């Protein structure tokens, strides 16, 4: 009987210890399962560690390399941060600052001149870009009758009313920042391409 009581007491102590070890407090973070999932190694964006033994005292990597080893053979620039993907939207192209005007600053935007020279090649590129980004809502002729425009409703007819006389800077700004039902496209289309679309709208759709 005493042995049973002894076993029972040990069992209860073990259970109590197990439950108490699961707790955490201000001075005790408790136990972590797979702590590397919670406390990952922070890699420097502009450098790489190519010493395969660096951090070996901590590592449990399957490839046998040290925990801090982070060289990427696919990156020729010897840094963890990759260069921007081709054809993504640049933020400081040619050293210029990002476009800073707010969505409501239409009067200021209207004063901006199109920096892209008008050429037949630019118009051809503008047509391609218009078909990629604009035709779904505005339609092939800019009359607001695209397939998506029919569903959304209220899409501007670029050939009608006050839209004919809108400055190029105004059109550029609305494409960048959006207006009304028009969503902002500044995160999707580089500024130079937007200006090419503006040329196409003014020259081919509005015939100005």
Image: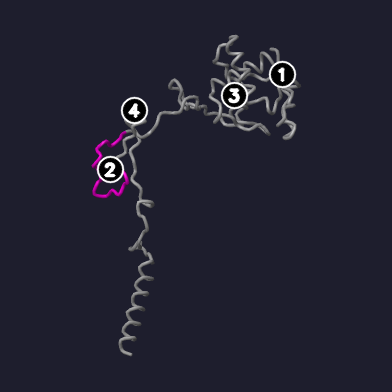
Tell me which numbered mark, 2 or 1, is placed earlier along the sequence: 2
Residue 185 falls within the magenta-colored stretch: no
The Cα atoms of the two marked residues, 3 and 4, are separated by: 39 Å
Q: Secondary structure at mark 4?
A: loop
Which label number is shown at residue 88?
Answer: none
The Cα atoms of the two marked residues, 2 and 3, are separated by: 55 Å
* Residue holding disc 3: 109
* Residue holding disc 2: 65
The Cα atoms of the two marked residues, 2 and 1, are separated by: 65 Å
Tell me which numbered mark, 2 or 4, is placed earlier along the sequence: 2
Residue 115, given in percent of the width and then of the height, sits at: 54, 15
The answer to whether mark 2 and mark 1 are in CB contact below 8 A is no
Q: Secondary structure at mark 3?
A: helix
* Residue holding disc 1: 164
* Residue holding disc 4: 77
Residues 25 and 50: in front is: 50
The answer to whether mark 2 and mark 4 are in CB contact below 8 A is no
The answer to whether mark 3 and mark 4 are in CB contact below 8 A is no
Residue 154, given in percent of the width and then of the height, sits at: 74, 32
127 left or right of 71 in image: right
Q: Is residue 66 above or below residue 150?
A: below
The Cα atoms of the two marked residues, 2 and 4, are separated by: 21 Å
Q: How many marks?
A: 4
The Cα atoms of the two marked residues, 3 and 1, are separated by: 17 Å
Read off the magenta span. 47-65
Q: Residue at x 58, y 9 (%)?
A: 119
Tell me which numbered mark, 3 or 4, is placed earlier along the sequence: 4
Q: Residue at x 58, y 22 (%)?
A: 194
Tell me which numbered mark, 2 or 3, is placed earlier along the sequence: 2
């Amino acid at each position: 009987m005493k042995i049973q009581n002894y076993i029972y007491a040990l069992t209860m102590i073990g259970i109590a210890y197990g439950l108490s070890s699961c707790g955490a407090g201000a001075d005790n973070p408790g136990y972590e399962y797979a702590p590397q999932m919670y406390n990952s190694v922070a890699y420097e964006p502009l450098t790489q560690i190519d010493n395969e033994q660096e951090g070996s005292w901590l590592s449990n990597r399957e490839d046998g390399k040290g925990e801090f080893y982070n060289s990427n053979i696919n990156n020729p620039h010897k840094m963890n941060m990759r260069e921007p993907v081709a054809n993504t939207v640049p933020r400081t192209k040619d050293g210029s600052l990002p476009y800073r005007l707010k969505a409501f600053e239409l009067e200021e935007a209207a004063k901006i001149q199109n920096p892209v020279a008008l050429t037949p090649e630019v118009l051809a590129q503008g047509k391609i870009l218009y078909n990629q980004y604009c035709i779904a809502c505005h339609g092939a002729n800019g009359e607001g009758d695209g397939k998506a425009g029919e569903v959304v409703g209220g899409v501007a007819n670029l050939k009608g009313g006050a839209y004919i006389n809108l400055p190029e800077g105004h059109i550029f700004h609305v494409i960048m920042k959006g207006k009304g039902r028009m969503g902002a496209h500044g995160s999707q289309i580089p500024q130079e391409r937007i200006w090419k679309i503006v040329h196409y709208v003014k020259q081919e759709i509005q015939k100005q």
